Image (cartoon, grey):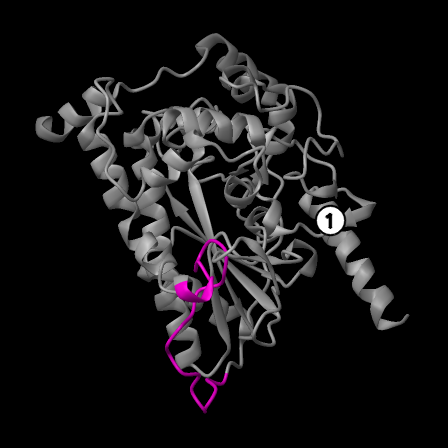
């Protein structure tokens, strides 16, 4: 068997275990076509509202009288994003918005002497604990899969396509999960809730920088990445951190959909994790709470498909796909992101509680129908009023 065919067979096995179905006409995604890039070059997407959406993250908006969208809500959101924004603005003159449209530069030199790793499996356990020491909540490791790497990245000076060739020889991807604050998530949609995402993007920027420095100091190559360079969702699934949900999110057994992901490309010898099957994706085939609750009706209520809704949908992957144009248009009206689909998800619960443990045990069993019946009786989770969140700060 030649090397090319062998690699192809490995991908097929991996796809089956990860729940992926890839068509023969698959094409790598060009990052120039994601909504956050199109909002700057595509006149069918760009508008005064979209410009105001981005401006509101840099210039403090006046705020509204509506709870969750007042001055202090926007102030907390923008402060939460501040560290991430500082990192992403470092390469502005070069057109490299680090962490979003380009990988993250690391100033640490690679040590001349490599740390000898005799027992890879044992060392991987130690390595994961180090990542958690720096603040990662979840850690998984998977081989490089170039299908998920953007065919082109974005030069943010003029929003044109640029080379996405990685500066190194990498064999593994370390995927780290960063859990979002549940109470903040429960206030979606609001500027207040968006701070939950901002906190984790800022945490990611720090943790990725620290971990890449750690790896390079041990003599191995390491390239940090957040939303840039490659699609993180398939990598997180391949690394065993969760399953793909109808709401377009990786749903994890530990935190449900309330997770942001970062990644590090490396050549450090590490033991690979396997994709999981805990009944989550199966549950999503029977549940439509996220689609039913989506204000712009951007989420699908039917089964996964290969349909390309627009140029912001990857070609040749059978999955639930959101209409990103409808979704982003709604965000611009709010002047902040909307994650109602995250808030109403039945997996958005505290799995450390007895009810949370029981729910997941039912999901991951032949009795999953009872969990579905349970959620149907409960109905849509109520939104936590933003004013109640603020009041809770002084009631502690």
Q: Is residue 287 above or below residue 38?
A: above
Residue at horizontal 56%, vertical 36%? 43
Residue 220 visible in rendering: yes
Which residue is more in the foreground, 349 or 62? 62
Provide residue 16's location: percent of width, then percent of height. Answer: 75, 46
Magenta stretch: residue 248 in it? no
| Quadrant of the rendering where the C terminus is positioned | top left
Q: Position of residue 144 (x, y in %)?
A: 64, 63
Looking at the image, which residue is at 60% across and 18% down? 369
Residue at 38% of width from left, 40% of height from top? 54
Would residue 20 be seen by someone viewing this image from the given angle? no
State the residue lying farthest toward the left. 394
* Left or right of 138 on screen, residue 200: left
Q: Which residues are magenta?
A: 93-116
Would you say 23 lies left or right of 265 here? right
Please state if 203 lies on the left or on the right of 315 as rendered.
Answer: left
Q: Quadrant of residue 196?
A: top left
Residue in view at x 67 percent, y 50 percent: 29
Up the image or down, 377 lies above or below 44; here it is above
Q: Is residue 100 magenta?
A: yes
Q: Residues within 10 Å of mark 1 (few under 14, many from 20)?
A: some
Q: Quarter-wise, where is residue 216 in the image? A: bottom left
Which residue reaches farthest bottom? 112
Question: Which element type, helix, strand or loop, lies under badge 1?
Answer: helix
Q: Of helix, strand and loop, which mostly describes the magenta segment?
A: loop
Q: Which residue is mark 1?
A: 15
Q: Quadrant of the N terminus?
A: bottom right
């Amino acid at each position: 068997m030649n090397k090319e065919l062998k690699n192809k067979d490995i991908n097929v096995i991996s796809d089956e275990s990860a729940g992926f179905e890839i068509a023969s006409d698959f094409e790598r995604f060009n990052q120039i076509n994601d909504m956050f890039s199109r909002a700057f070059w595509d006149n069918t997407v760009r508008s005064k509202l979209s410009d105001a959406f981005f401006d509101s993250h840099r210039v403090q908006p006046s705020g509204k009288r509506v709870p969750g969208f007042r001055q202090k809500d926007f102030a907390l959101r923008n402060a939460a994003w501040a560290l991430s924004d500082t990192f992403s603005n470092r390469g502005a003159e070069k057109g490299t918005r680090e962490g979003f449209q380009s990988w993250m530069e690391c100033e640490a030199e690679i040590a001349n002497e490599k740390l000898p790793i005799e027992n890879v499996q044992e060392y991987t356990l130690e390595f994961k604990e180090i990542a958690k020491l720096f603040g990662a909540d979840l850690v998984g490791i998977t081989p490089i899969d170039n299908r998920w790497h953007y065919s082109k990245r974005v030069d943010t000076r003029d929003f044109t396509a640029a080379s996405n060739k990685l500066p190194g020889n990498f064999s593994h991807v370390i995927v780290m999960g960063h859990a979002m604050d549940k109470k903040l998530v429960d206030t979606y949609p609001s500027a207040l809730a968006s701070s939950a995402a901002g906190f984790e993007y800022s945490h990611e920027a720090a943790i990725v920088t620290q971990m890449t420095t750690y790896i390079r100091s041990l003599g191995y190559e390491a390239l940090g990445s957040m939303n840039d360079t490659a699609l993180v969702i398939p990598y997180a699934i391949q690394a065993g951190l969760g399953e793909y949900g109808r709401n377009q999110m990786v749903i994890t057994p530990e935190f449900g959909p309330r997770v942001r992901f970062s990644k590090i490309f490396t050549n450090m010898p590490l033991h690979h994790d396997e994709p999981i099957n805990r009944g989550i994706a199966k549950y999503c085939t029977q549940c439509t709470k996220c689609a039913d609750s989506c204000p712009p009706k951007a989420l699908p209520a039917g089964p996964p498909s290969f349909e390309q809704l627009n140029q912001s949908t990857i070609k040749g992957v059978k999955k639930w796909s959101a209409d990103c144009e409808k979704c982003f248009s709604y965000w611009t009206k709010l002047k902040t992101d909307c994650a109602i689909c995250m808030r109403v998800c039945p997996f958005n619960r505290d799995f450390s509680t007895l009810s949370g443990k029981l729910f997941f045990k039912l999901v991951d069993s032949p009795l999953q129908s009872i969990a579905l019946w349970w959620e149907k009786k409960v109905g849509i989770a109520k939104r936590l009023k933003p004013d109640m969140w603020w009041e809770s700060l002084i009631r502690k």
